[in-house]
Every structure is written in C-alpha cells, then in structure tokens.
Image (spheres, rainbow, N blue to C red):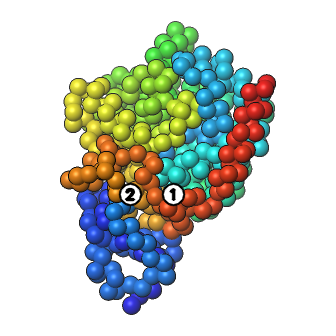
Amino acid sequence: MESIDAIIHARWIVPVEPADTVLENHSLLIRDGRILALLPRNEAESAYEAKVVHELSHHVLIPGLVNAHSHAAMSLLRGLADDLPLMTWLNEHIWPAEQRHVSAEFVHDGAELAIAEMLLGGITCFNDMYFFPEMTAKAATQAGIRVSLGMILIDFPSSYAQSPAEYFDKGLSLHDHYRHHPLVSTVFAPHSPYTVSEKNLERVGALAAELEAPIHIHLHETAEEVAQAVASEGERPFAKLDRLGLISPELIAVHLTQLETAEIERMADVGAHAVHCPESNLKLASGFCPVHELMQAGINVALGTDGAASNNDLDLFGEMRTAALLAKAVAGDAAALPAHAALRMATLNGARALGLSDVIGSLEAGKFADITAISLDDLHSEPMYNPLSQLVYASNRNQISDVWVAGRHLVRERELTTISRGEVIAKARRWRDKIAAS
Ligand SMILES: CSC[C@H]1O[C@@H](n2cnc3c(O)ncnc32)[C@H](O)[C@@H]1O
Ligand SMILES: [Zn+2]
C-alpha cells in the first residue's frame, strides 16, 4: 500500500475540469499539499494508506472558490454607508472614512475579519486591492489562505503612500519580497482610469509586460464614469487604456457594465480577463455586465465580491447564484449562464485571470489541494437529481463544512482552525466603536 497524507471520501466530486463531470462515490488523495489522484473509492482504499481519513458521506467537493476582486480590509466599513450610487458613496463617505481610519493595524484586522468570512464561505484564494497590502499578506499567511496581492496605485496621498513614486516603490518591493512565496502572488492594481494619470498607467503597462504580472483595475463601472471621461478627455476609458498599452492578456478588468461591441471584440482578441461583481453592481445601481456576450465572444469571465462596504458580504456562493439569475434576466435567455458555467466562473476562470490556473482552480492531479466541501444533507437539498443544480440554485454558504488550502485543513466542520473567531469579532467591535465615534 502506498502512503499518502490524507484521503477524502466524498459522495460527489465536481472537479470543474473536465467540464460537466460529476463523480460519485470517489476519493480525493492528497500528498505534499497537492492532489495525487481522484479515484473510485474502492480503488483508492485498496491501493493507498492515508495518515488522515475524512469521511464526507453526503457532501460534494468542489475546487476552492477564487474571489477575483476584493478589498478585504473594507470589511471594517461594512454597513457604514448604504443605498448610494458609486461616486456619492466613495466621495462623501468611504474615502473620507479611509482618510481618517486606514492604518496598518486597520488593514490587518479588517483583512483578518474578511479572511475568516471568506474561508467559512469556501473561498481559498482572493485577489485584493487595498492600502497596506503587506498587512493583508500578513493576515493571509497567518490564516493560510492564498492571496493575489495588489501593488496598488492611486494618484492621491494616503496614510500608506504620499506619492505615485512611493506607491510604485512599495509595490515593487512587495513583488520582490513575495516572489517565491507558496501562497502569495503579486499583481499591479491601479485603482481606475479616473484616479491614475496617463503617465502612471503607462508605467504600469510597461512594468506588467516586463514582470509578466497581471493588471487589476476597476473599468467602466458606471455609465457616469464613461460619460465624464468622454466629456472631459474626449475618449472612453477603455480607449485610453488601449492607447496606453493596458488592454492586454495581463488585464483583469473589473465591473465592465458599459461595453460596446468593438470593446468586447478587442478584449477577446487580446485575451484580456473580465471580473463580474453582480451584487456590488446591483447595490450601487452601477449597471449590468453583459457576461453572456463576453462569454460568447470567448472572454474569460471570473467572479468577485468587491468589498464588504458595497456588497455587503463576501459570499461567492451567493454571487454564483446572483450571477446565474441576473444573466438570464439581462440576456432574456434562461440558458445564458447555466449552473456549471457559474461554478466555473467562481473557480477555474478566477484562477486563469490571476495566472494561477496551472496550480489551482480545478480538482486535478498535480494541482494544489485547495478544496471546499459542502454538505448536501438537508431537506432543501432533496431530492438529489443533480448536485451542480443544488449547489448553485439551492445551497448557501452555511452548508460549507470543510476547506483546505494546499492540503491544510483551514475549516473543519464549520470551525476555523487558524483564526480565533472570538478575537476577530472582538477586534471588529472595537473598530466599530472607534469609527462610529468619529
Ligand atoms: C487604492 S485601494 C482601493 C480603493 O478602491 C475603493 N473602492 C472600493 N470599492 C470600489 C468600487 O466599487 N469602485 C471604485 N473604487 C472602489 C476603496 O475604497 C479604496 O479606496
Ligand atoms: Zn472594487
């Protein structure tokens, strides 16, 4: 018998790749943090001896979810300002609050709260854009979650950096520091075409090409953003980014509620990636991303939560369902985004956007064992004709029982193993008192 670190016996496994596959009564084998194989249970038991055995008899295993757009530390601003359009929300509430309160400690504590919520919600990797990214990295590595860290850039001073030059310097040293880290990767994260100058956007484009790093940016989030750019600069933001060399295979464009056919074709031609944040777009009344058209054009579309101050949760399970339902309504086509495509957006497509699809995003031999287990042992999951349908249309994040990242068991029977739930809640309450008092 061959020795392995762990074996998970599951009722169902949805590996995402190959597409549309649902394995029943199979086992997933883990060795050295990676998936060794997925085998029928009887074959696995007769050939392998595992140090740890997990019996998930009425559960489905899926790849860990990839949150392709977040501002983790904004969890501490959840509920501070609701029911407002984007620019009022940012200009009159969020940016003033950030100027007053954002510090290294704020970001560590906020990121930790967000990571706890994301792990309990089955998210094993998040692509973050926020001040003090080194503190987000610290909270992530302490927790054991995978993170794609934004080397942020915005043309206004903050407690994190005083000038664009300082943002660049800090970002690049972060890139050097985490170059070989097993859980942390770095991406450029210029905030948007309306907050970063042409000169700085151009530099991002050049550096991204040189370092082969993705570029994560808010783009065409609202009609107002596009109209203002046309009025003041005579050009749509997409056209500006294209002129500056940013519409490229490295691009991870977030929101995209306003797109012309030629822009969709251009994204498809270069192989740029899109991130859909349906609940944030709905709450801020930003508009609808035409995901169906993007997918038909062959563009890779991933899924993000955005920050908890605009969503107001970090629940990618909920986003899958919202994305699937919304796409049907927007396209007037019930087949616009089927369940299997929604799950793919939340897993493999996210990994592809982040340049990580060789190592995560599906349950395949050789990839890291980033795994989410969902219990389907409840009356609202019956009768079981199709686990994929139950997952996307009839399940919620409270059914997530176990989560592994690189084979490490970070959520065990709905309990966090690396984060103290009580301490995270206590810190969030202290921040709430401080922020509410100011
Ligand atoms: C430079 S750090 C990130 C910056 O982005 C702000 N932000 C959060 N959500 C959104 C959004 O939906 N659109 C634009 N900007 C957003 C956040 O408050 C930080 O200042
Ligand atoms: Zn955002």
Quick check: can you spot residue 136? no
Determine whether 316 is above or below 258 in the image. below
Tell which of 395 and 279 is nearer to you: 395
Determine whether 158 is above or below 114 in the image. above
Residue that lies at the very extreme toward the bottom in this rendered image = 1
Residue that lies at the very extreme toward the front in this rendered image = 379
Q: Which residue lies under the disc numbered 1?
A: 414
Counting other residues with Cα less than 10 Å from the Cα at mark 2, is it few (<14), some (14-19), or many (20 or more)? many
In the figure, residue 430 lies in which quadrant?
top right
Tag 1 secondary structure: loop
Tell which of 141 and 310 is nearer to you: 310
Q: Position of residue 142 (x, y in %)?
A: 67, 58
Counting other residues with Cα less than 10 Å from the Cα at mark 1, is it few (<14), some (14-19), or many (20 or more)? some
Residue that lies at the very extreme toward the top in this rendered image = 231
> Which image quarter holds the N terminus?
bottom left
In three-dimensional space, the C-alpha distance between marks 2 and 1, rounded to whole angstroms, equals: 10 Å
Q: Amino acid at mark 1?
A: Arg
Determine whether 344 is above or below 290 in the image. below
In the figure, residue 151 lies in which quadrant?
top right
> Which image quarter holds the C terminus?
top right
Determine whether 139 is above or below 279 in the image. below
Which residue sits at x=67%, y=45%? 425
Which residue sits at x=60%, y=28%? 79
Q: Position of residue 21 (x, y in %)?
A: 25, 59
Q: Position of residue 84 (x, y in %)?
A: 55, 18
Q: Which residue lies under the disc numbered 2?
A: 375
Q: Amino acid at mark 2?
A: Ser
In the figure, residue 435 lies in which quadrant?
top right
